[in-house]
Image (cartoon, rainbow, N blue to C red):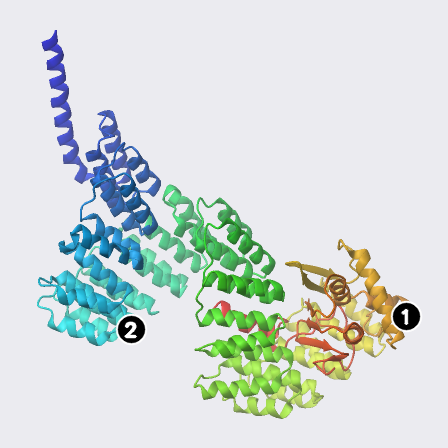
Amino acid sequence: MVKLVSNKRANVQITKYFFMSHLNTIAPKVTTLNHLKQLQAQIICTSLHHQNQWLALLISLCKRLHAPPPYTRLIFNLAHQPNVFVFKNLLKYYSQLGSHNDVITLYNQTQKCDTKTDASVYPIVIKSAGNAGIVFHAHLLKMGHCCDCYVRNSIMDMYAKYGPIETARELFDEMCDRNVVDWNSMISGYWKWGNEIEARRLFSIMPERNVISWTAMVSGYSRIKDLESARRYFYEMPEKSVVSWNAMLSGYAQNGFPEEAINVFDEMMNAGVKPDETTLVAVISACSLHGDPRLAESLVKMIDEKGIRLNYFVKTALLDMYAKCGSIVVARKIFDELGAYRNSVTWNAMISAYARVGDLSSARELFDRMPEKNVVSWNSMIAGYAQNGQSAMAIEVFKEMITTKDSKPDEVTMVSVTSACGHLGALELGNWAAKILTENHIKLSISGYNSLIFMYSKCGSMKDAKKIFQDMKTRDVISYNTLITGFAAYGHGLEAVELMCKMEEESIEPDRITLIGVLTACSHAGLLEEGKKVFESIKAPETDHYACMVDLLGRVGKLDEAKSLIEEMPMHPHAGIYGSLLNASRVHKRVDLGELAANKLFEIEPENSGNYVLLSNLYASLGRWEDVNRVRGAMRKGGVKKTTGWSWVEYGGKMHKFIVGDQSHERSEDIYRILAEMKKKMRISGYIADKSCVLRDVEEEEKEDMVSTHSEKLAIAFALLVSEAGEVIRVVKNLRVCWDCHLAIKMVSMLEGREIIVRDNNRFHCFNNGVCSCKDNCFKLPGGDGGMSRCSVVGCARGLDFLVWHQTFCD
């Protein structure tokens, strides 16, 4: 009986031995995730699934097949006491994924488990640690591992990449037995730090070169945008690997030559070189940057014709390409197909795609479903709201981000947040955002400083905007444009002209937006001669430059000259030009030119209610009520709805919004009490309401009631209610401030001893001691709370502000 049991055990051991040999034989033949799962099932059936030998093998296959991280981690968790091989294979897996934090976390786990690690682990860990890898140098010296050539090279490579490069060179010079890998690390390091001369010198004297040496030169010249030299080294290579082709292809892709990148890809395929995922990601990314659907389709067709299989890294790049080319449906199809292979890059690409086309509900739905958010996820959502006119939501998401503490904000985050604060005119929130910048030690690039200039300019704090500008060590054309636009909004024409001169002294060439900004500033300041000089200096004026000049001529009363300029234009006038003429006609009561401009506008943009309102204002100011009713009838017939006028004021970290006659605010009763008190004080001081802005033929008393509850008056009454005595009041209004409100606010500033800054859709009005910074030049005749004073630029109310915002935050 004992002998029988013994024989059975022996047979089981023999069977298991042969089965293990079988597993070792079939392991190299595993080529798909399904094959891998079948192999794992066989290992489980033979009760080998807790043994480190087989777990290490399975994880190694996961690395080769790019298996999903959750699946790979599940295999690792089967180990009761993982040995160095299991740990090492998972470290390699995470390193290949680029999951550097997971590498460091896993390494720390090995230390806690007292797992004995050999020298081969450290090159992986040092690579993932980045510039923090310096902490391993002393540890490895103590352990005696620095004699290992792989460890030695990883330390030198770390210094070459992250600095100081001099330390890397010292280690290199101390080596008695340098190999080609060491030479290559130094050459790559010098390219990283922009030292072309030393990289070229080392390449010329190295005793032997391999394909990586040549590839480093191709990548280096591509990095400094010398594609001619990169191409020369590429074609002089004795032999090329897929990495060499990738370097040349990426050089073209990253320097904005997607078509050349696709040509290299085609050449590579014809040479019989099998592309890897880096090849495909690079060429797909080139198409993404170009955003050309035609180019994208030609690439996809080529990939299909060659029968190239796509893994989930490549599919993620493909998703991003389709998204940036506007093919959202195809992008979403790929996203859904990826399933368990979706990573943070995939989620972020899809969220950004939806945000880019303004589908914020779909973007938010994905954002809320994300299993794990990183800073890019938050940035995509915040930027999506900020760039689609939902500034308040952008700030709310940012508040949520810093509350969760999952991700720290970076410069990209803060650029979107400051943009949102600027659009809201929320100085209190803007200062809070600036404080977060300081507290988190976020280093700003030029674009970061430009966003602060934009924010302070839009929040009515030109002093802070100028300080940021002056403190900048390096400025670009956008820096100047942003500050010039701020001066324009304040009517500081001379400052804008002087700033353009300073710009030229710094050898920064003014662009079209610079000139639009300066011309707008001259217009708001009534500087006709200065504006003419600037306009005449433009070699080939564009339509927007003509629009600014028409606006300037209209403001100073030279309407016939403005009309002549329009007739002499070499291009077709856009809506902004006729809008400027219509507004000037309203101010100066030129019905003939007003009707001419309005009729043109009704053809160009029939749905813009502002044009109808301006013409109605013109008729109403002359008492032509039949014509007013005719225009209103045309609006009704065309389904054109008048834009609602609203104003908001910041208090307690929130924006409080009001419309004409608004009684919805929680403190409405107190607001109307303050309003009545203001009205009483103003009447004693001689205020008489100007009712000519009312576009209806009603009783005088009813007209007075209409103008007395305009949105800006309600906003100012609320600000007086909640703010401290002497505190500056800041109000933002979506339309033009009417003459009666302008007059009333001047009196309130004097009676209450307050500085009141109002940003309407055209400019800033700074009221102090009964005087406005615009010197009443904007209000020769009344407007109306529902009136749309358009900006002359690009034919829309957003105008110059939109151009500068787009250049600052989107280009």
What is the distance, in whole Å, between disc 2 and disc 1 at their CAs?
73 Å
Mark 2 vs 1, N-terminal side: 2
Q: Could one spot residue 699 in this view of the protein?
A: no
Q: Residues within 10 Å of mark 1 (few under 14, many from 20)?
A: few
In the rendered image, the quadrant that contains the N terminus is: top left
The dot on residue 224 is: 2
The quadrant where residue 764 appears: bottom right
Say above or below: 340 vs 7. below
- Camera-side residue of 18 and 85: 85
User: Which percent across, then down, holds residue 649?
Assistant: 69, 64
> On the rendered structure, is 435 left or right of 771?
left
- Camera-side residue of 655 and 528: 655
Q: Residue shown at 16%/65% (left/top)?
A: 172
Q: Residue furthest top?
A: 1
Secondary structure at badge 1 equals helix
The quadrant where residue 279 appears: bottom left
> On the rendered structure, is 285 left or right of 525?
left
- Camera-side residue of 563 and 755: 755
Identify the amino acid type marked 2: Ile
User: Which residue position is annotated with label 1?
Assistant: 700
User: Which percent across, then down, holds residue 137?
Assistant: 23, 56
Disc 2 and disc 1 in contact, CB within 8 angstroms? no
Identify the amino acid type marked 1: Glu
Q: Residue shown at 28%/56% (left/top)?
A: 135
User: Which percent across, then down, holds residue 560?
Assistant: 69, 89
Exactly how many numbered labels are in the figure?
2
Q: Nearer the viewer, mark 2 or mark 1?
A: 2
